[in-house]
Amino acid sequence: MMARSPAVIPVPDLTDAVVRLRAPERSDVDAIHAACQDPAIIRFTRVPFPYTKVHAQAFVRNAAHELRAGKGLHLVTADAVTGSLLGVVGLTFDHFRRSAEIGYWVAPEFRGRGVAPRSVRLLTAWAFAEHGCRRVQLMADARNRASQRVAEACGFTREGVLRSYEDRLGERIDYVCFSALPGELTGPGLPD
């Protein structure tokens, strides 16, 4: 079977009535900038450090560019009622392999409310049903147990540890690799 070629990706309308995934907007810049000052986001994600407002502006601009280029889908996780930013979730596509890598962060004041699992389930289900992915992987910093619990709660399978996988803030970081295949997602908030 031929790999799906990159093409403009339409922004999906994904919600489970608790969270809504939407394209990032200029009005999100301040909230993104504020959240990315959090020590856990700095430590456990790949956001630049120090994270400036220019980085937040670039994130919004680059999300639109990656969408047009068919390379990725990076969305804001918003409160389904108020529309306020709770976090960010995104997919980077490997069209040749019909797979994607998912990543996310949640602003500190919204952690522990199921925001990350809901976002991961919605976007992963979309990747399988609408984008034709056959595998979605999730890479969690080995020190980040909360992110590993998100993967497990969503039905991702732990595949192993990638030792000394990359440099982060001056040290080599191990990552735990998880994957999900179509039909494997679990938990509340899955789309019908």
Image (cartoon, rainbow, N blue to C red):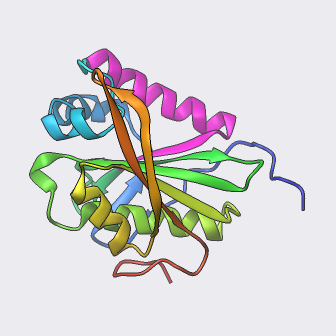
Q: Is residue 25 left or right of residue 132?
A: left
The residue positioned 16% from the left and 31% from the top of the image is 34
Q: Is residue 108 above or below residue 47?
A: below
Q: Estimate the x, y position of residue 142 in percent, counting from the top left.
A: 31, 50
Q: Look at the image and tell me whether residue 80 can be seen.
A: no
Q: Residue pushed farthest left?
A: 109
Q: Is residue 54 above or below residue 161?
A: above
Residue 178 vs residue 105, the one in the foreground: 178
The residue positioned 56% from the left and 60% from the top of the image is 136
Q: Is residue 145 left or right of residue 108?
A: right
Q: Residue pushed farthest front?
A: 163
Q: Estimate the x, y position of residue 153 in percent, counting from the top left.
A: 33, 74
Magenta segment includes 72: yes
Q: Is residue 89 left or right of residue 136?
A: left
Q: Estimate the x, y position of residue 53 in percent, counting from the top left.
A: 26, 19
Find residue 19 and report its image quarter.
bottom left
Quadrant showing the N terminus: bottom right
The residue positioned 43% from the left and 69% from the top of the image is 121
Q: Look at the image and tell me whether residue 15 can be seen.
A: yes
The residue positioned 36% from the left and 81% from the top of the image is 187
Magenta segment includes 64: yes
Q: Is residue 63 above or below residue 153?
A: above
Q: Main secondary structure of the magenta part?
A: helix
Q: Which residues are the magenta region?
A: 53-76
Residue 66 vs residue 93, the one in the foreground: 93
Find residue 38 and report its image quarter.
top left
